[in-house]
Amino acid sequence: MSEIKFGTDGWRAIIAEEFTFTNVRRISQGIAAYMKAAGLVQKGVIIGYDNRFLSESFARACAEVMLGNGIKTFLFKKAAPTPLTAFAIRNLQAGGAVMITASHNPPEYNGLKFIPEYAGPALPDVTDQIEAEVDKVLDGGRIYVLDVNEAAKLELFKEIDLDKEYFAHLLHLVNGEVIREHPLKVVVNPMYGAGINYLDRILTELGCEVKTINNYRDTMFGGSMPEPTDVILSDLKRAVQTFGANLGLALDGDADRFGLVDAEGNYISPNQFGALLLNYLLGSRAQRGPVCRSVATTHVLDRIAREFGIEVIETPVGFKYIGQGLREKSAMLGIEESGGLSVMGHVPEKDGILACLLAVEMLAARGCGFTELQSELDGNYGKVFSKRIDIRVNDLMKAQVLSALNQFKPKRLAGTDVSEITAIDGRQFVLVDGSWALVRVSGTEPLFRIYVEAGSEERIEQIRKEVMSAIGLN
């Protein structure tokens, strides 16, 4: 048995290999011990789960351990999105939540994440304590278990459904009247996941004409993976064009990430949407606060923020750090390039359902499509292109590249002066013309990620080649 470590967003492993009922119980016992030490037991715990193979059974096994430790447990009656599970913490004033999900990973994976009482992703100080408690269990510590039926008699166990409360909360964050006045034709793709029957129900209630695809549980996710990326969303692109829709909306496996397709069937990246949304929110909302983005996210956000006189908070990769900015710095928008987003007034957890609703509101309010909005934004702040390249490496190569990266301190890149080199997460090289490159090693896989943003695809290629050559990744 290898040690259990929490990655960027929880622990994930292959079902029946390491993701087993035994290990779920071990981790659940560790979480219960953490909650006891933190004085959170009396508040109780929420347990949510996605549509993956056996997720509901793993959730029940987790519940039995929580109950065995005397922790009142609220278990969702059906598969629940991660943002709904986080919302439940605040709604029920619980001490935290366990979510059984592997999010957008391939179907053979499942996972478990702990969401602390602040209703956002757990920061390292929390996961470090949980890992220490799990280690004690792995060293022979006892696991306490109580059957849910027995716990129900003791009023320690309750099944919950908070869809109504969650919908009401979302409509405090989204201008539903604008959508009702200008309803759109929309295609919704929950990718067989926990987001089934959320977006379509809300948008139908708001008067939109909605068509759904992949709107049923399939633990194999149609033979693909539930990740709303450009390549994987080909069926949504076709459906949008066939239906003559204004846009297509996609959710990943646990509905915490979003994917967007415009009326022409083109993929709208999170970087593009983040900039469009910030520009829209600043023009349509009175509230102001910093913008919180990861180091790998577009700097167009910075240009917009400067125009409006608001601060940009740059974080390491991982929405847990953005969530911290939303909680502690009262950020009005938190976003990452991989499709995580939340706003002021919401839980500090990424929410794909909210992101999609805001996209519909923006198009309804502006009365035009993404193409027109993007053209206007480019005219005001300059057109940019973004690219990410993943390079797999072995341990020896990883060490060599990290050494070269630490020593790489160029004054110029691709013929342009370097204005700043940062080490928030990996190494980022910012050029005086606004272009930038970031090299960071993945926290969960044996690979390097290289991000480049520039004013043209040719410029991206120039910067990419020079950086990769300098650190031995060419």
Image (cartoon, rainbow, N blue to C red):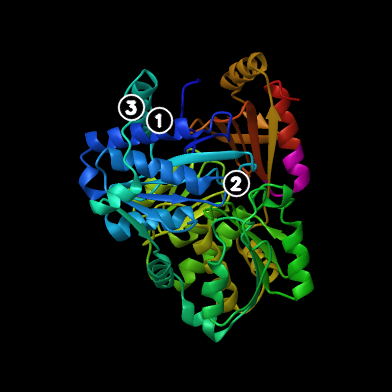
Give the crowd class for mark 3: few <14, some 14-19, many >=20 residues within 10 Å.
Answer: many
Any mark on residue 104, and which? Answer: 2
**Residue 188 figure quarter:** bottom right
Residue found at the very far bottom of the displayed protein: 181
Residue 94 percent coordinates (x, y):
28, 52
Residue 328 percent coordinates (x, y):
32, 48
Residue 398 percent coordinates (x, y):
63, 19
Q: Is residue 278 visible?
A: no
Mark 3 and mark 1: span between their CA atoms? 9 Å
Residue hosting label 1: 26
Helix, strand or loop: magenta stretch:
helix
Instruction: Name the residue nearer the viewer: 119 or 149.
Output: 149
Residue 307 percent coordinates (x, y):
49, 60
Instruction: Name the residue nearer the viewer: 89 or 142.
Output: 142
**Residue 275 figure quarter:** bottom right
Any mark on residue 365, and which? Answer: none
- Answer with mark 3 or mark 1, whichever residue precedes in sequence: 1
**Residue 288 figure quarter:** bottom left
- Answer with mark 3 or mark 2, whichever residue precedes in sequence: 2
Q: Is residue 36 visible?
A: yes
Is 284 positioned to the left or the right of 345 in the image? right
Q: Which residues are magenta?
A: 454-461
- State which mark lies toward you, 1 or 2: 1
